[in-house]
Structure formats: C-alpha cells, structure tokens
Amino acid sequence: MAIADAALRVRFFDLLAAAADPAVELRAGLAAQLATIPPKFFYDALGARLFEAICELPEYTLPRDERVIFDRYTDEFARQIGAGCTLIDLGAGDCAKAERLFEALQPAQYVAVDIAGGFLRTQLASVARRHPRLDIVGVAADFSRGLVLPPEVSERRRIVFYPGSSIGNFSPEEARVFLTDIHAQCAGGHLLLGADLVKDPEEIVAAYDDALGVTAAFNLNVLNVVNRIAGTDFASADWRHVALFNAAESRIEMHLEARRALQVRWPGGGRSFAAGERIHTENSYKTTPARLSDLLRAAGFADFNLYTDPAERFALALAQ
Ligand code: AVI
C-alpha cells in the first residue's frame, strides 16, 4: 500500500499488515518451555531511540569501530560499486549511516527498509529535505523472514547495505538462508555487510550491560511492546536485564529474568514464571574473518573483500 507524500516525494510502503500476525508469534514464543521474544520487537519508537542512545555509550564501541572502516574505505567502495546505484538500506533506523555514503556513492534511488515504520517515515522526511533530488522509497517491513520489496524498487545496480552487525542477531544457519536470499535479490549487484568480531568476553559483556543501564532499559522496553501487541500484562519492574557471553556459541545473549514467581496473562492464555526464570530476547553472534568469509561463500557470494579496522574489532564485507 503506497502512501503518497507528494510534498517530499517519498514513496512509502507499509508491508507490515500483510505479514504474519505478530501477536500469534509472540504468544507462541512466550508459551514455549524456554520463553523467547524475537529481537525485532525491540524497535518501537522508544526502542529505536534507546538503540540510538546505546550507539553513543562508551562501552558499545561497535558503531565507532565500524566508522573507522567507512572513513578509510568509502571511496574504494564507491569505485567498486559505481555511481547511479539503487541503495537498499536494511534496518535503516535513522538512515544516518546510509546518508553518509550518498556523497561518495551518488545513488539514483535510496530504499530504506525498517520494521519501525513510524520512526522510518519521520526520518525519511528529513532525508528528503536534505536531498531534494534523490528518489526515495520507504518500506515498513519485517525482513527477518525474507525480504520483499515493492516493484517500485529499481533492479538497476542494486547494493544491499546491511551495516551494524545486525546479521549477528541471526543464528549462523539463519544468516546463511537470509544472505542466500539477499544474493538473489542483489541481481548481480553488491552487498555491503557489517559484522562485529570476537574480542575479550568481559568487554563484550560490558557493551551489552552498560553502567548507565541504557541496554537494560532497551531490553525491558520490549515488555511494553509485547503488552501492546500481544495483550500481555507484563510489569517491567518484575524483571531484570541479564547479558552473558556464551563462548561455545560465540554469542552474547540477552535475557529478562523474573525477580519473583509471577503469572503473565494474555487473551486466551497465560503462563507462570518461577523466580529466576528467563525470557531469551536476543543473541548477538561475534564472528571472525574466516567465519564471515565462509558465510558469504555459502550464501553464493563468490567475489568479496573484507575490510577491518587496524585492531580487527569489526569487519565490513563488500561482496558481489
Ligand atoms: C542491532 N544489533 C546489531 C544490536 C546488537 O549489538 O546486537 C542490538 C543491540 N542489543 C543490545 N545492544 C545492541
């Protein structure tokens, strides 16, 4: 469904209504023996703002590590990609990372995709004001189970931009399936992918359990989102944020832990949680250059280069 924004020339498509019922998905995850809430539900308007705040935290160095690589290699990326591309920004958020590439890439079309549709719409209005001649398409969609793009998205010289290590929020097998689909959708174009690299576990845990408690607020806010979508009666004060590094899986895990024995109800159901019982809310896999290369190959990208910061904390892959 296109909502014309004639004044700003942003064509906006809300594909969320056509997706599977999120209330059903959430209640099934909560009813499971090991309760889960998928991380895509973090990003309501407040969650998106809290994630922006996380990116400013001293402990969460990932955006700065990634920025070092962009500062050094953006011109080289632009040379390889060529001008006039269709820049498809997955999980666009505030669109800032993609916008920093506009000058070098000179895209013919900018396509921003995000599950936080209202937030994205607001951000795109600002992007359109700053880039009045750019063809802009906004898509509110949950692409975690496959990317569907409206026909208005050009197939010409596509570059799928997936920075920030969101690929790490998929399991390795889910990431392979997801990138295989992206490979097909690139239609011979490029993928520019970010991935956080393994480092000292204490440092990783601090990045997901910061001293100010911003990540705790981000994690707890998901309960408010779930209450709205699934009709549950969570009280965030009954839960505590837990972040731990699972070395065997090379991932940080975020959980919400019940502070006391309690009941959670929703229309047509409910469950009890014992004191200390957890809801698993997010995995964030930390990779190595070798594992990232294997993943790209397995997804069908035969031709790629990896770029890291000097301390090898983060990697960007430009793949074709
Ligand atoms: C969006 N994603 C890459 C972030 C991450 O690091 O996994 C989400 C996040 N969760 C807690 N802090 C940041």
Image (tube, rainbow, N blue to C red):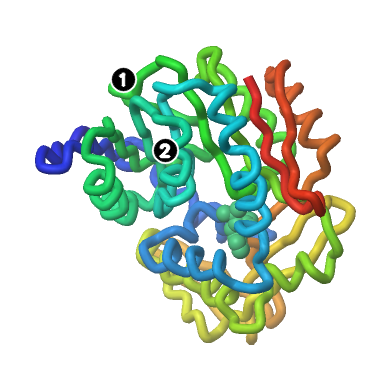
**Residue 43 left/right relative to 193:** left
**C-alpha separation, residue under disc 2 versus residue under disc 1:** 23 Å
Question: Quick check: is the Cβ at mark 1 less than 8 Å away from ligand 1?
Answer: no
Check disc 1: other Cα within 10 Å, few if <14, some if 14-19, many if 20+: few
Which of the pair 213/56 is nearer the observer? Answer: 56
Please give left or right for residue 102 compared with residue 127 in the image.
right
Q: Mark 2 Cα within 10 Å, few/some/many (few <14, many 20+)?
A: some
* Kind of residue at badge 1: Pro
Q: Nearer the viewer, residue 235 or 6?
A: 6
Task: Give percent across and percent down for residue 183.
Answer: 59, 21
Seen in the picture, residue 219 relative to 73 is either above or below; the reply is below
Q: Quadrant of ligand 1?
A: bottom right
- Residue 213, given in percent of the width and then of the height, sits at 59, 81
User: Which label number is shown at residue 151?
Assistant: 1
Q: Does any portion of residue 32 appear in the rendered image?
A: no
Among all residues in the image, which is located at the extreme right?
Answer: 248
Q: Which residue is mark 2?
A: 102
Instruction: Decide which of tag 2 and tag 1 comes sooner along the chain.
Output: 2
- Residue that appears at 60% across and 83% down: 212
Whether residue 114 sits left or right of residue 171 in the image: it is left
x then y, percent, for residue 223: 48, 70
Q: Is 242 in front, or is 92?
A: 92
